[in-house]
Amino acid sequence: MITVKKARLCYVLLGILLGCSCSDVSRDEAAEMDRFVTELMGKMTLHEKLGQLNLPSGGDMVTGTVMNGELSDMIRKQEIGGFFNVKGVRRINALQRLAVEESRLKIPLLVGADVIHGYETIFPIPLALSCSWDTLAIERMARISAIEASADGINWTFSPMVDICRDARWGRIAEGSGEDPYLGSLMARAYVRGYQGNSLQGNDEILACVKHFALYGASESGRDYNTVDMSRLRMYNEYLAPYKAAVDAGVGSVMSSFNIIDGIPATANKWLLTDLLRDEWSFGGLLVTDYNSIAEMASHGIAPLKEASVRALKAGTDMDMVSCGFLNTLEESLKEGKIMEDQINTACRRVLEAKYKLGLFSNPYKYGDTLRVKEQLYTAEHRSAARAIASETFVLLKNENHLLPLGLKGKIALVGPMADARNNMCGMWSMACTASRHGTLLEGIRSAAGDKAEILYAKGSNVYEDAEMEKAAAGIRPLEHEDNRKLLDEALRVASRADVIVAALGECAEMSGESASRTNLEIPDAQQNLLKALLKTGKPVVLLLFTGRPLVLNWEDANVHSILNVWFGGSETGDAVADVLFGKVTPSGKLTTTFPRSVGQLPLFYNHLNTGRPDPDNRVFNRYASNYLDESNEPLYPFGFGLSYTDFVYGDLQISSETLPKNGELTASVTVTNKGNYDGYETVQLYLRDIYAEVARPVKELKGFERIFLKSGESCDVKFVITEDDLKFYNSELHYIYEPGEFEIMIGTNSRDVKTKCFIAK
Ligand code: NOJ
């Protein structure tokens, strides 16, 4: 084992004793790390250095068309710097042992994994999490994920994914925090804080990796891995903020994206990886590619593996995920003078520094305590946090005549292919969860109902009518395809005995996530047929919607009595849904992604620019206005939208002054009253609009929000302080400035229903 001279704690104590400031202490630490890494690199051969840049997949979860082989030999020869997606602390320890006991320099390994929304305790998918607007809950989710993942041997998570997405066709919209850069930035920080803790020194604090840098969510036509082409102005004003927020929060690593930017794959885009990330944003951590993306530069039409590896290294990449291009080709490229040894050294240093910061040189088995698995995975405490957070993420889209919450009485028919689908509760990226350990929706609802209400059940339909279509949709979580007719008949028999029907329908888990783009965003055909048949019974119907993305729900909105969007709520979905369904918890989720009326409207987002011919009406077709012949411009459910069981009433918007003086501030406030019969949370949202500017500015932009809890009958004054910083944007020279002039201030319960006032900024 390699010994590190001084532990961080000693430095901190020394710093306190000597009365040094924190930055002095961290300068000392940096110097010590530098000395350590320099000494180590002095002993390394070129081949060993290239080994550090190599990140093969362990193979438990494969997300590309290529696979890496057996790792043991490569570890002994020091040909890898780490590996990812291997489950189980004992297996991981065995591989780590090879590195620290059987390789020449005994350099420990990074152990990565896609811990995206929990580990064995699974939380809602990230898009759902963002709908809680609860950054503390998200930080807690990330903390618990880090505790569990680290107990199972993992020291590096490929999360948070912060790609802004405005196109619901893209399946990976499920993995991010929606369409808004301000909210996305707050979420990004919360994830990083949760994973990395205070210092990365604890054995339950792991390296975070912000991804996919950059703009991956803007792929053309929502098709995964597709081209991105975007102006710098749009990048800076609308897409880059969440990545930057993660960097500012101290994220230890960044993953580049698959897409091209300005014609060059992000993997080898020097402007992106060096000029912007390193130089402008001062990112000093580890930069890793996405899966096999150096090799994929051949298909992009850029270069075959050898040349692509040169370009990726020169652009600023440190670690090559899966392609093995760095390991196998850079030595020759160096001999040919295509790269310099310094470039390899810089990348190697960054990999070693990441290991140093994690404390792996002091203790390579820091994450290898096998006793932790029993004590810290899927604990009652973690599960209860997951249950509470899940119930915050559900969004009530419609609730005619206060059908919800349901009374605990009579007969309730739970119908639909998502009702008893154990494998489908968690959503994509839940590699570590053991489905047999968590309940289904049916079990959660039955347990909440006890002997007070009778819960009848029927599957009702397949996901799709067509078995082949269903197989493709189900992906790695195969579903049993049964006779559609029989299922429907049985469902109608069950429904006929019930007082109320709860239909659990929508996407199955793998219909969103990576490589799950769709062009039709309606509820799949077999389930629509089921829903229509259930409504024909004339009984009240609640749609519990499972989905990883916005769906087109025009028909459902017009015909179903209540719609509760539960996304994929994680391992505790069953209990969490029951909590909301029966009113133990009042729903409070608000959409962070716009629900369109039609796929033809996509991309659709609230913070858009106006055209020179904005649509004056939005309901009827207006010739020569910017609109469609056959659909309004409006979404079905706007950004920020979400109902409650209770009624929040907003008073008049007050502003402290009609002028915002230079270097001064202005207060905007509103009184919110809970006039309904339930206690509950409301998220009060603040938007601003710059009326005239050098470059066109969005019709509104989220600039603040408050999540308040009001008991029935209670009121609360919500105040927002506005300063010049809230008015700033990147101008055509990419200077971050504000322009004095007229602004609109809007406060409301969602991005559409707002109260407005104007002020002048000096
Ligand atoms: C490909 C995905 O794009 C990325 O998000 C993930 O972290 C890697 N595969 C590793 O599994």
Image (cartoon, rainbow, N blue to C red):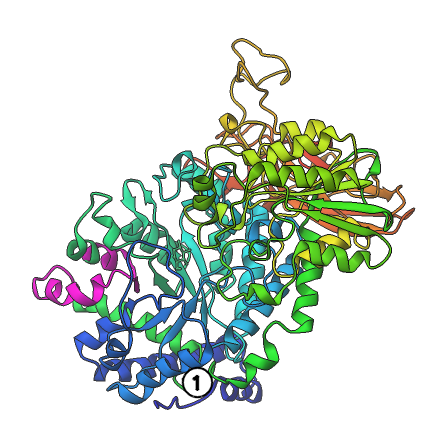
In the foreground, 607 or 217: 217
How many marks overall? 1
Residue 749 in view of the camera: no
Q: Position of residue 729 (x, y in %)?
A: 52, 40
Q: Which residue: 51% across, 60% down?
A: 430
Q: Secondary structure at mark 1?
A: loop
Q: What kind of residue is marked 1?
A: Tyr
Please say if 214 is above or below 287. Answer: above
Residue located 60% across and 55% down the image: 124
Residue 283 in view (yes/no) = yes
Q: Residue at x 57, y 38 (%)?
A: 484
The residue lying toward the viewer, choosing from 559 and 386, is 559
Query: For ligand 1, which image quadrant applies?
Result: bottom left
Residue found at the very far left of the displayed protein:
336
Magenta highlight on residue 335 = yes
Instruction: List x then y, in percent, for residue 542.
Output: 73, 39
Residue placed under numbered mark 1 in the picture? 365
Residue 305 percent coordinates (x, y): 18, 55
Q: Pick the quarter of the image with the C terminus.
A: top right
In the image, 233: left or right of 48? right
Query: Would the CB of label 1 be found within 8 Å of ligand 1?
Result: no
Query: Furthest residue to the top?
Result: 623
Up-down relation of residue 35 to residue 433 (above or below): below
* Residue 313 in magenta stretch: yes
The quadrant of the rendering that contains the N terminus is bottom left
Residue sitting nearer the eye, 646 or 572? 572
Image position of 24 with respect to 391: above or below: below
Residue 35, picture quadrant: bottom left
Q: Which residues are magenta?
A: 310-339
- Residue 344 at what x, y percent from top left? 22, 68
Q: Is residue 369 left or right of residue 278?
A: right
